[in-house]
Structure formats: structure tokens, C-alpha cells
Amino acid sequence: MHQSIEYFRSRYPFLQSGHIYFNHAATSPLSFNVLEKIEEFLVMRSTGAIDDFTMVLGIIAKAKALTAALINTTGDRIAFVDNTTNGINLLAQGMQWQSGDEVVLNDIEFPANVYPFLNLQSKGVSVVFAKAHDGIVSAEDIIAACTSKTKLVSVSFVQFLTGYRADMKLLGEYCRKHNIIFCVDAIQGLGALPLDVKECCIDFLSSGTQKWLMGNMGLAFIYITEELQQRLRTAYAGWLSVEDAWNLLHYELIPKKSAEAFQPGTLNLLGICSYLGALELFEESGQAYREQRILDNTEYLREQLTAHGYKPLLHGVKRENLSGITSFVPVNPDELFAKLSKAHVTCSLREGMIRFAPHYYNTKEEIDAAVKEL
């Protein structure tokens, strides 16, 4: 296991340009490890054993095993899908809803975790939005919005604008105690911060791989407990989602008992190769190392912004509620964003806010250089 920031920085070709990349909450740059996995797969598909299904199965199995280790589960509880939204849709469309059931969200959620549930209103399902206060929706706020009619709570692990990280364990324990399904959109936290699905009593999780997990676009995964899977109707069925898939002319719709029941057909294998490359590089650092570097970067960035007259959101929030995302509201956001872009500092402009999102390989020197441009 490496603990050298110089080594990890050497694994990202983007850094050779001299640009500063603080946009991991949108899309991450790809590492040499990812490029090597892609090349290996393309060479196999173009010049080698073109239809090497054994190799493909090995790639899928390893990617699932490393994903499972990331969230403390087993590979059979992981299924690959195409994006976070469609992962959540599998849950929303698979449940047996009754008119009057409630889903609790919050009013600063990313739309991927909203529209799948708003789409249930035609079935008589009500969506309740917990209210944010100063960019914070705490576990206590969400719990306070629950009633005897609440059937499901869905929340982002990390809020996409403010970077606030709610107490997943407290929320999960409440949901488990009250027989409420607990769903987590984990895309803004996984890869950066630890999340234990068992400790946090998470029933369902969906996450794309292109942000903090540093894979490619067009691939996501879901986690689902065995208990919840038994309660769901499989919204989509296909030849690879059934038990006896390779008995091709024996049409018997018996869904697999593993999470692969949610994989109806051919997967995004190039995306899985990319993701596997990213996960293997993460293995070299370890989760604790990445978390410490990211939170140290966040605290240092917040200090520097404050020293230069900018007030980052989440003032006074404890370290355990911070993440890799830091946002602030400048007087002239469009002008400032253009200035940063011209200086080759890549960040995001969201809802009138400048959002910085440095990862584990970013440095304090890069933070100093970015803040200097402000």
C-alpha cells in the first residue's frame, strides 16, 4: 500500500497539464490505471479472444468484490446499472405502493433522487420534503418529517451543493426501528468517505462511478439487502436476470436470488473496466488515507477562503459532517467562475455558488493557487 502523494499524483495524466482540478463532484479525470484497463479490454476485443466470456466474468466479479468491500457487503448484493437515477427507479417502481404511502426527501436534494419518487404520485404516493436550514438537512430534520404513513426515506450521503454529510447511522437506525425503507444516493461520497451499509442499516443504495469513485460515465451500481429484494417486484426482466439464463429456449421467469436479478442484459463492460482500474488504484491508498487527505483539504480550503473574505457554507459544522465539497456565494459568481476557468482552475458554478471539490491527490499548494485567483 502506497502513502505517497507524489506517487498518486503521477497516476493522473491530467496533472501533467499543470491545470488544477477541483471538480470531482461533477466528473473526475481518469487515471493511468483506468486507461490501462480500457486498453487491455479493447485489445482483447479487437485482436485477441474476441468473445472471451470467462475474462468478462472475471472483470465483473472483481469489480463487484472491490465495490462490496468499499461498503461492507458481499458481491452478490451488488448489481451494475447505467446511472444513479435508474438505480433508484428500480426501487421506486419495484415497491408495492398503497395510496396514502409517504416518501420523505428534502428540499435541497439532487433531482436524481427526487423525480423517481415524484413519478409515483399517480399511484397515490405523497412526497414530503424536509426543510433545509442554512444548507443543512440533518438526520434529525428528516426524522422529524416522518409520520406513521412514511414507507421510505431517501437521502444523499453527501449533499451536492453544500457538501453536508448527514448522520447515516442515526437515520438508518430510526428507519429500521420504524420499518421504513432507507435508501441512499451515495454518488457524492463514495470513494472519498467511508460508508458501512450494515452499520447504517441501509436497505438500498445507488451510486454512479464517475465522480469521487473516479470511473467513467454511463456506469452505476446498486446495493440491495436480501430482505428488501424479496419484497420488491422486479420492474424489468431479461434473459440474464433469471436463474437458468443459459437454458436459452426454456422460458421460465424465475428471478435470480442475488442482486443480478436487476441486470436484465448486456452490461457496460467498458465502464466496468474503467471502474475496476479506479478501484484498484484506490486499493493502493486505502480508504482511511483518502478520507484524511480529503477532509484535511476541505478544512484548509475553508480556512483560506475565510481568510480572503469569502464565507463558505456550513459555518461551524463539525468535521464528521463535512465532505470533499466546499461552496460559497460570491457577489459576482459568473465573473469569478470565468476568471477561475481562464486561470485553468476547474470547478463548478451551481445555483449562484462556486463549488470546489478537491480529491485525495490534490494539494494545499493547489488550494493556495486557486484561492489566490479569487
Image (cartoon, rainbow, N blue to C red):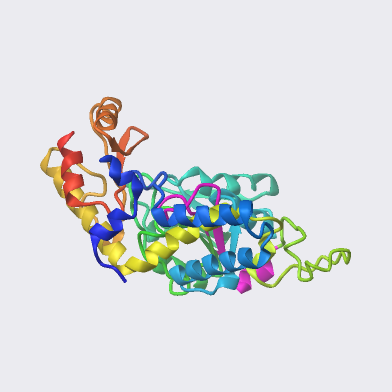
User: What residue is shown at x 58% (from left), y 64% (from top)?
Assistant: 60
Tell me if residue 249 comes above or below residue 372 in the rendering.
below
| Residue 264 image offset from top left, x and y in percent | 71, 58
Q: Nearer the viewer, residue 75 or 46?
A: 46
| Residue 261 image offset from top left, x and y in percent | 69, 65
Tell me if residue 131 comes above or below residue 157 in the rendering.
above
State the image quarter where residue 356 is shown. top left
Q: Nearer the viewer, residue 175 or 41?
A: 41
The part of the chain drawn in magenta is 206-232
Is residue 101 in sight in this rendering? no
Q: Is residue 123 magenta?
A: no
User: What residue is shown at x 85% (from left), y 67% (from top)?
Assistant: 252
Q: Is residue 130 left or right of residue 151?
A: left
- Image quadrant containing the C terminus: top left
User: What residue is shown at x 58% (from left), y 69% (from top)?
Assistant: 61
- Image quadrant containing the N terminus: bottom left
